[in-house]
Amino acid sequence: MHEFSIATAEMHKAHAPEMIMMVEHGVLKADHINWDAAKKMQASMGHGMHNEPNSLLLDPGKSGEIVWHFPKHATLEFACNVPGHYDAGMTGKIELGH
Ligand SMILES: [Cu+2]
């Protein structure tokens, strides 16, 4: 189970606590996403979870699509923010116009 997310390094960092909360709410399991728990968490917190245009959270073996219009100049990162994954190296730089 992984996330694919495009954002600035700061945005990835800010997103990390939300991902930890998803583990605490039983949404992110070791090998799958508990979508029922995700709906409950979403209902109790009153804001959307992972339906943002810059991010996809995928069960093993699934694929998805992000349409992203890059600016001429940007320093971004793609990353997986499932707890521990970013630190394990699931990230890379996107540098445009440098
Ligand atoms: Cu990952």
Image (tube, rainbow, N blue to C red):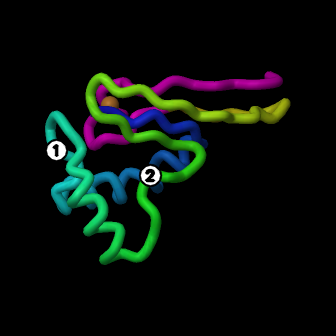
Residue 68: image location, x then y, percent: 68, 35
User: In what quadrant does ligand 1 lie?
Assistant: top left
Location of residue 39 (image quadrant)? bottom left
Q: Residue at x 35, y 27 (%)?
A: 62
Look at label 1 and name its amino acid: Lys
Reading the chain from its start, which is encountered first: label 1 or label 2? 1
State left or right for residue 19 relative to residue 31.
right
Quarter of the C terminus within the rendering: top right
Q: Is residue 61 left or right of residue 98?
A: left
In the image: residue 10, left or right of residue 67: left
Q: Quickly name the residue at label 1.
A: 29
User: Dot 2 corresponds to which residue?
Assistant: 50
Under tag 2, what secondary structure? loop
Query: Does the beta carbon of the residue at mark 1 sit less than 8 Å from ligand 1?
Result: no
Q: Marks 1 and 2, how far apart in space?
A: 16 Å
Q: Nearer the viewer, residue 15 or 62?
A: 62
Asked whether 92 falls inside the magenta stretch, the response is yes
Q: Whole-percent x and y of residue 64?
A: 47, 31
Q: Badge 1 local density, few (<14 within 10 Å), some, or many (20+)? A: few
Residue numbers of the magenta segment: 79-98
Residue 65 higher or lower than 24, as above or below: above
Is the stretch drawn in magenta largely helix, strand or loop?
A: loop
Kindly identify the residue that appears in the image at 40 percent across and 34 percent down. 80
Q: Residues within 10 Å of mark 2 (few under 14, many from 20)?
A: some
**Residue 32 pos. (x, y %):** 20, 38
Q: Looking at the rendering, in which quadrant would you find the N terminus?
A: top left
Answer whether residue 56 is magenta in the image. Answer: no
**Residue 46 vertical position relative to residue 59 in the rendered view, above or below:** below
Q: Amino acid at mark 2?
A: His
Q: Which mark is residue 53?
A: none
Q: Vertical placement of 38 versus 64: above or below?
A: below
